[in-house]
Image: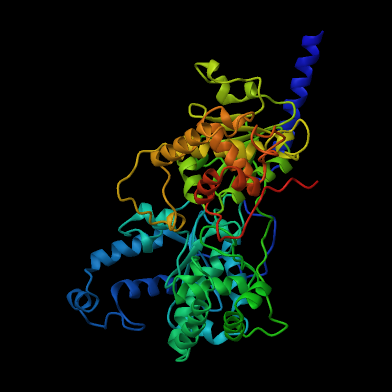
């Protein structure tokens, strides 16, 4: 009878999970919204004629003269006719969708949803509502915009297919300014698989195109932009962030903030993401934006997301996510790191997502090492166990996992870390809860995945998230080992979990640094538990300094673990 009851309960739970999965949105589908914009059509012949003239180097109206020979046409264009035809075939086969933004072409592959083109129309017309002269100049200059499909790479686009370093560029960008200007479909449509889900790449890249166009129609523009940038640098603003790199990026970044769509507090962004923040922090930059966009009260506009992100959706079914077992019905993306579950609540998955984002805000390179390893985080629901997970069931040697626990540090064969919903949503300082499991398992993974890699001699990272930080490798292991042995020799950490081994020692330091440690006995030689950053600094200053260096929070906007608020 008990067996029958257990089977019935399991069936009910499975049915409930399946019903929940049916409720969740396909992460690759656009949100259910309508945008007031023209109808999307096939590109007109005039668009391909413009492309042909650009490729052949002809000026507007500079086509082959009547009576001219193929040799004369080739001499003018510098390209053999058969090569030009081959090039145009690539463009014609690729671009199947088109929308006209008051004369400015926007094109995309047939796979791109119509709503992405209409969203582009909406963004461009609102941004330039007070500057029709800029839009007219873009049309005159034969500027056009292209949308990179959510399943496409930057170098899949005809214009970019010959990039000399495609792997670097595809990791680096999902769009660029200039002519053409490009941005990703997933960013336009606010899809949950957008790696830039808290900023508008469309606004940013289009602002580069505005910059370029202003330089052609306004002789004072470059001086005004450069003066604002120089003022910011002289006042120490935008220190070590993207906006401080050069005048062009400064302009695009502050314009994003002016339209309420810049990301904040990460490896290349400071705290300025909205208009009022820009006004308070950089009034000169704010006035530059206000004067350029020239929006009347009736025209004023701020960017809004088509759906709230991050979100919980059904797991993607594209090749990029092929390693997610069909057993999982829930998915959320934390800065490209996969968080999955089945019975766990949306609240638990989203709180885990937020904790990961904040923990690695300034060390995305470490998170990328885990992503490259194929690691994922599973949040267990109240009635689930590690033994239920498909990765556990596939293990040849199950003795390597304690299936009776509700928390699992990184297991290289399963490619998983596991945490329990009840811990994720609870206060670590409460009785019976223990340290925050998300921070615990990720602290351990920092060590085991990134902190034991071979040294790459003279390594210099080129991606934005690799700048101004030291790559973790086996030197990290050596440092932690030395700190641990020094602490043991001094009699520190006795009576706590940190004394067990060097991994536990490092993890205890990270938990204390982020105020995420649970109830624990005080060390035998200290007056209280080491459960905050300040106490860690007082008790073990060497470990504190190394954790702070590793997580790169010094001089940045701070974060301590925040308990979930129901």
How many numbered circles are shown?
0
Quick check: can you spot residue 356?
A: no
Query: Viewed as shown, does residue 324 lie left or right of 48?
Result: right
Quick check: can you spot residue 387?
A: yes
Colour scheme shown: rainbow
List the single residue furthest toward the bottom.
Answer: 219
Image coordinates for residue 426, horizontal then vertical, percent: 75, 39
Note whether 558 is above or below 566 in the view shown. Answer: below
Note whether 489 is above or below 468 in the view shown. Answer: above
Image-quadrant location for residue 262: bottom right
The structure residue drawn at horizontal position 57% and vertical position 37%, both measured from the top left corner, is: 507
Q: Nearer the viewer, residue 225 or 215?
A: 225
Query: Viewed as shown, does residue 45 lie left or right of 13?
Result: left
Query: Viewed as shown, does residue 209 lie left or right of 67?
Result: right
Image-quadrant location for residue 196: bottom right
Q: Quadrant of the N terminus?
A: top right
Image coordinates for residue 429, horizontal then vertical, percent: 75, 39
Note whether 437 is above or below 106 in the view shown. Answer: above
Q: Nearer the viewer, residue 205 or 91?
A: 205
List the single residue furthest toward the top.
Answer: 1
Q: Nearer the viewer, residue 86 or 307?
A: 307
Note whether 3 is above or below 429 in the view shown. Answer: above
Image coordinates for residue 79, horizontal then vertical, percent: 23, 70
Image coordinates for residue 554, horizontal then vertical, percent: 55, 57
Q: Nearer the viewer, residue 543 or 123?
A: 543
């Amino acid at each position: 009878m008990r067996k029958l009851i257990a089977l019935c309960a399991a069936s009910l739970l499975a049915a409930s999970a399946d019903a929940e999965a049916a409720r969740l949105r396909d992460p690759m589908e656009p949100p259910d919204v309508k945008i007031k914009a023209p109808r999307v059509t096939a590109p007109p012949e005039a668009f391909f004629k413009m492309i042909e003239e650009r490729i052949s180097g002809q000026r507007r109206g500079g086509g082959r003269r009547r009576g001219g020979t193929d040799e004369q046409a080739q001499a003018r264009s510098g390209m053999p006719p058969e090569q030009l035809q081959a090039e145009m075939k690539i463009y014609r086969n690729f671009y199947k969708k088109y929308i006209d933004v008051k004369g400015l072409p926007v094109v995309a592959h047939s796979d791109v949803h119509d709503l992405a083109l209409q969203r582009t129309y909406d963004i461009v017309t609102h941004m330039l509502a007070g500057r029709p002269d800029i839009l007219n100049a873009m049309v005159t200059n034969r500027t056009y915009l292209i949308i990179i499909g959510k399943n496409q790479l930057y170098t899949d686009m005809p214009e970019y297919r010959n990039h000399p370093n495609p792997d670097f560029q595809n990791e680096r960008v999902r769009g660029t300014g200039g002519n053409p200007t490009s941005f990703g479909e997933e960013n336009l449509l606010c899809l949950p698989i957008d790696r830039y889900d808290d900023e508008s790449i469309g606004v940013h890249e289009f602002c580069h195109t505005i910059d370029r166009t202003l330089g052609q129609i306004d002789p004072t523009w470059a001086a005004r932009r450069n003066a604002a940038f120089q003022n910011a640098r002289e006042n120490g603003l935008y220190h070590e962030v993207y906006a401080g790199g050069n005048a062009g990026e400064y302009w695009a970044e502050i314009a994003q903030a002016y339209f309420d769509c810049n990301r904040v507090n990460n490896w290349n962004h400071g705290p300025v993401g909205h208009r009022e923040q820009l006004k308070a922090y950089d009034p000169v930059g704010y006035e530059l934006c206000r004067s350029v966009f020239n929006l009347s009260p009736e025209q004023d506009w701020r960017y809004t997301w088509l759906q709230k992100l991050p979100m919980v959706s059904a797991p993607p079914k594209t090749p990029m996510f092929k390693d997610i077992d069909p057993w999982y019905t829930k998915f959320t993306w934390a800065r490209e790191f996969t968080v999955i579950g089945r019975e766990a609540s949306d609240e638990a998955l989203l709180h885990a997502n937020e904790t990961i984002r904040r923990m690695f805000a300034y060390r995305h390179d470490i998170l990328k090492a885990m992503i490259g390893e194929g690691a994922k985080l599973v949040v267990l629901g109240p009635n689930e166990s590690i033994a239920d997970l498909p990765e556990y069931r596939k293990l040849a040697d199950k003795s390597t996992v304690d299936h009776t626990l509700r928390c699992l540090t990184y297991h290289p064969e399963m490619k998983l870390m596991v945490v329990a919903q009840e811990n994720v949503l609870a206060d670590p300082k409460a009785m019976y809860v223990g340290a925050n499991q998300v921070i615990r398992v990720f602290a351990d993974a920092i060590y085991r995945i990134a902190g034991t890699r071979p040294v790459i001699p003279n390594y210099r990272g080129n991606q934005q998230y690799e700048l101004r930080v030291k790559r973790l490798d086996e030197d990290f292991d050596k440092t932690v080992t030395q700190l641990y042995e020094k602490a043991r020799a001094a009699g520190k950490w006795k009576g706590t979990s940190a004394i067990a081994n060097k991994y536990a020692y490092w993890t205890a330091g990270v938990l204390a640094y982020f105020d995420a440690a649970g109830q624990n006995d005080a060390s035998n030689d200290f007056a209280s538990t080491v459960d905050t950053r300040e106490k860690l600094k007082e008790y073990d200053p060497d470990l504190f300094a190394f954790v702070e260096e590793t997580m790169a929070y010094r001089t940045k906007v701070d974060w301590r673990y925040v308990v979930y608020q129901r």
